Image (tube, rainbow, N blue to C red):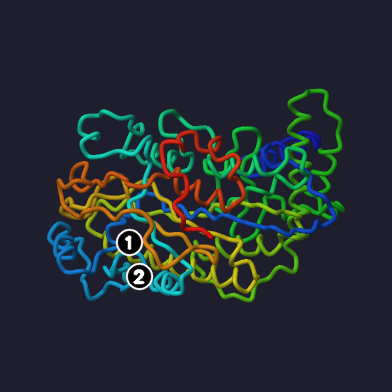
Amino acid sequence: MPSSALRRRQFLKLAGAATAGGLGLGTLAHLSASAQSVGDYKALVCLFMYGGNDGNNLLVPLELPAYDGYRRARTNLALDRDSLLPIAPTNTSGARYGLHPAMAGLQGLFTQGKAAMLANIGSLAVPTSKAQWEARSVPLPDNLFSHSDQQAQWQSAIVDAPPRSGWGGRMIERLIAAEAANRGYGLVSVAGGNLWENGDRSLAAYKVSSAGRFGFDFYDASGGDPLSAAISDTLSEPRSHLLEQAWTDVVSRSIDNQRILTQALSGSELTTVFPGTGLGQQLQMIARLISARSRLGLSRQCFFCSIGGFDTHGDDQLQRQTELLGEISTAVTAFYEATVALGVQNDVALFSASDFGRTFQSNGQGSDHAWGSHHFVVGGAVKGGQIVGRYPELIVNGPDDAGDGKWIPTTSVDQLGATLGRWFGAAASLNDVFPRLSNFDADLGFMT
């Protein structure tokens, strides 16, 4: 094969990797080579639990009348009362709750006032009662109980149309000026593509691996090896075809961006020990990227990480969820400790999200798709030690049940996002970022 054809084939393969691997058009802003001073830094971290976590076993009432009802309804899915990790929320009039036994790290953060629990949160168009649900007398989110649709609605806060952008991306676009040299790193994913970090103007997530590979880590700009020399020759060739030239530009600028990020991360090793799990390594990379904030000249960043496996219809739900929540608890605890070591614990907030909750009633083996669920938020600026929002009445066919223990959310994703956004510095654009925010109380009050 002629060398020019070989170079062209190599080039096209690499160009495809540039976009498919996360070095796409949304990330091509050149960064300043000199570090800028960063004063008022803040970061949001979205931890997405794909598949629909069963929040009914994440946060459980310990008081006997309520717990007895929980145990009767959940049958084979009920956790033993003595196994639950007790917490004493400051705002429940003395009523005690228990966290899943795998969440010891989260229990510690809650007790220290560094974590809050979010009760019965989900996608909503407007506040919705059971009577309104049954009569269909208010707008409802499209395609409830669908994995793909509810993932999109959680990440976009758009419930009545196919969304093209996410609320994290929309916030960053409104906070970072369009001409800012560093805006391409305002959105970073260590878990591949996601909707939450898509802007509605031009930005998308800069994707990196948890191991720190950026797609062109093998490339030697000096041309010291045959492949690097072939790439350099290909990139320097003039292109008469506009599309070929555009792809050449994509690869060239992706290589530049990788070089800048690699330099920024050099010397950013952490003292905190992270677990060697998938999520642990993702959060470790996010902590490293946060440690490089001054070298990148960034004042606002959104990060995305994820863990899958929560679609627990089968008879292994209890064991599988224990493994997954244990991985989350140890990883999130290490991440918070890393922010303390970096001195940014008051500047970073991590929150959990998932497709939906799962049915309160067992299907005989596991649980099925539902609606509202319980979540958590962690950080030094969190008003921790409390349960935010109203915990549902755990009564099948009761006032909060849309059927089979599908809890009708009493807190919306919009409220969660707006509360975080206000702390993040996006107060002036919240109604633009969250189109339905006027339907809800815009501040849940869990951030300082």
Q: Position of residue 411 (x, y in %)?
A: 37, 47
Q: Secondary structure at mark 2?
A: loop
**Which residue occupies the extreme front position in the image?**
93
Q: Tell me the residue at 28%/61% (across/down).
A: 57
* On screen, residue 246 above or below 225: above
How busy is the neighbourhood of tag 1: few (under 14 within 10 Å), some, or many (20 plus)?
many
Q: Position of residue 364 (x, y in %)?
A: 15, 53
Mark 1 or mark 2, which is nearer the start of the sequence?
A: 2
Question: Which corner quadrant of the image does residue 92 belong to?
Answer: bottom left
Question: Residue 223's spot in the image, x, y percent?
Answer: 85, 51
Q: Observer-nearest residue: 210 or 339?
A: 339
Name which residue type carries label 1.
Gln
The N terminus - image quarter: top right
Q: From what the image shows, is residue 274 above or below residue 25?
A: below
In terms of image quadrants, where is residue 212?
bottom right
Looking at the image, do the residues carrying marks 2 and 1 touch, with CB atoms under 8 Å apart?
Answer: yes
Q: Nearer the viewer, mark 2 or mark 1?
A: 2
Report how far apart the C-alphas of labels 2 and 1 lie in the structure: 9 Å
Quarter in which the C terminus is drawn: bottom right
Rendering coords of residue 205 (x, y %): 61, 45
Residue 117 appears left or right of 9:
left
Image side of residue 149 versus residue 422, left or right: left
Identify the residue shown where x is 20% and y is 36%.
131
From the image, tell me which residue sits under label 1.
Answer: 321
Residue at left offset 21%, top offset 45%: 401
The residue carrying mark 2 is 102
Q: Quick one: label 2, few (<14), some, or many (20+) residues within 10 Å?
A: many
* Marker count (numbered): 2
Mark 2 residue type: Ala
Toward the top, the furthest residue is 241
Mark 1: secondary structure = helix
